Amino acid sequence: MTATQIWALIVLILLVALTYWAGYRGGLIDGRLEGIDEGMSIQQADHSQTVCNLELSLDRVRNQYKQLFTKYERALATSKLGEPERHTLLAIAEKLRIAAETFAAFRTGKKLERESVELREQALAIAAMLEPVEQEAAA
């Protein structure tokens, strides 16, 4: 081999090594960039899943709030019932007692008598529930 061929071989080996090294470095850089992109997408997916879970929790809390607010409104409306309503219920109970006694006098009015007695008991129970509300309001 001549000196020129040896120099050409050395240059050729250096060019191949330089090309291999450049390709290796480019691959590392591309792999690193892809890894960063994939990591960011995984992180975004984790964050989006967390956001979805938080939105579901918020929806559940909103539903519970609506249920509690409905119960509150119902309780507030019930608490506004007072002494006039209690007297009305007691008057209804008295009229139902009279009706039950009247139906009891007739032999054919047994069913009406039972219904009148049941309605009277219900009216008295509601009136009794209204009585403690008035006592609590006075206290």
Image (cartoon, grey):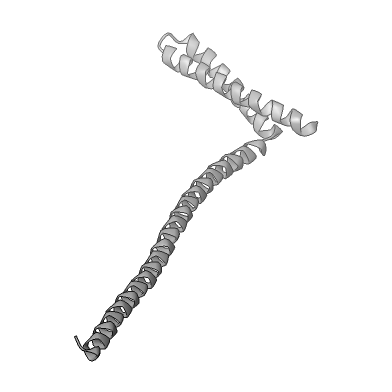
Using residue 64 as the reference point, say whether residue 19 is left or right of it: left
For the residue pair 37 and 21, the one nearer the viewer reads as 21
Using residue 134 as the reference point, say whether residue 31 is left or right of it: left
For the residue pair 21 and 57, the one nearer the viewer reads as 21
Q: Is residue 71 above or below residue 98?
A: below
Q: Is residue 133 above or below residue 112?
A: below
On-image quarter of the N terminus:
bottom left
Where residue 101 appears, as percent x and y from the top left, is: 54, 13
Identify which residue is drawn at 40% across, 11% down.
108
Using residue 86 as the reference point, say whether residue 135 is left or right of it: right
Where residue 132 appears, as percent x and y from the top left, is: 70, 26
Where residue 106 appears, as percent x and y from the top left, is: 45, 10
For the residue pair 79 and 65, the one nearer the viewer reads as 65
Q: Is residue 5 above or below residue 123?
A: below
Identify which residue is drawn at 45% across, 59% down.
43
Q: Quadrant of residue 89?
A: top right
Residue 35 in sight: yes
On-image quarter of the C terminus:
top right
Where residue 70 appears, as percent x and y from the top left, is: 55, 43
Identify which residue is drawn at 62% across, 36% down.
78
The residue at the far right in this view is 139
The residue at the far front in this view is 2
Total marks drawn? 0
For the residue pair 86 and 65, the one nearer the viewer reads as 65
Q: Quadrant of residue 19?
A: bottom left
Identify which residue is drawn at 24% across, 87% down.
8
Residue 109 in sight: no
